[in-house]
Amino acid sequence: MPASPNARSAQLENRLVSFAVRIVRLSNALPSNFAGRHFGKQILRSGSAPALLYGEARGAESDRDFRHKCSIALKELRETYINLKIIDQSSLLETVRLEELLDETNQLISIFVRTVRTMDTRINQTKDR
């Protein structure tokens, strides 16, 4: 039996919380030099934001509000992905520590791209009625 929409939403929220926890741990593992502190703060902000935004989106007042919050979460995920690539390519952490997180970020980006597109379709269908 497929999961209900509410169960899927809760699963995604839990996945985003776990993602944020992994980002917190990663930011704490960065070196305490200038670059490490800078990217630690950057990735902590962008990597924790999607969980918070999705929590807000689940209580959205309308489809447009939900879509807007999800699109901001998507932007934050894309920023996190770029930060991870910079951290990797600058050798601030070992690549093996980042590979799974890069993959998870990419998967979450795909989920939010689909969500935003679905909401665009729903909003446009409602508008055409």
Image (cartoon, rainbow, N blue to C red):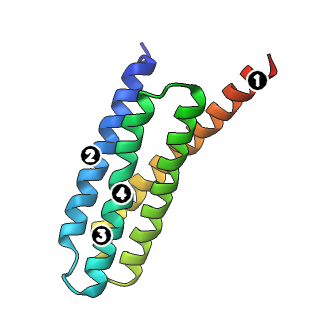
Amino acid type of the residue tagged 3 in the rendering: Lys
Q: In the rendered image, which residue does mark 4 sit on?
A: 47
Amino acid type of the residue tagged 2 in the rendering: Ser
Image-based side of 57 in relation to 64, left or right = left
Label 3 vs label 4: CA separation? 10 Å
Q: Earlier in the sequence, mark 1 or mark 2?
A: 2
State whether residue 118 is above or below residue 25. Answer: above
Q: Nearer the viewer, mark 2 or mark 3?
A: 3
Crowding at dot 2, Cα within 10 Å, few <14 / some 14-19 / many 20+, comes out as: some
Q: Which quadrant of the rendered structure holds the N terminus?
A: top left
Crowding at dot 4, Cα within 10 Å, few <14 / some 14-19 / many 20+, comes out as: many
Give the numbered dot on residue 127: 1
Q: Earlier in the sequence, mark 2 or mark 3?
A: 2
| Element class at badge 1 | helix
| Element class at badge 4 | helix
Label 1 vs label 4: CA separation? 34 Å
Q: Which residue does the image show at 54% across and 33% down from the upper left?
A: 65
State whether residue 27 is above or below residue 104. Answer: below
Q: Which residue does the image show at 36% across and 76% down from the upper left?
A: 87
Amino acid type of the residue tagged 4 in the rendering: Gly
State whether residue 16 is above or below residue 8. Answer: below
Q: For residue 58, what is the image quadrant?
A: top left
Q: In the rendered image, which residue does mark 3 sit on?
A: 41
Residue 79 placed where, x, y %?
Answer: 47, 63
Image-based side of 101 in relation to 68, left or right = left
Residue 26 placed where, x, y %?
Answer: 24, 65
Give the numbered dot on residue 31: none
Q: In the rendered image, which residue does mark 2 sit on?
A: 18
Residue 80 placed where, x, y %?
Answer: 42, 62
Q: Earlier in the sequence, mark 3 or mark 4?
A: 3
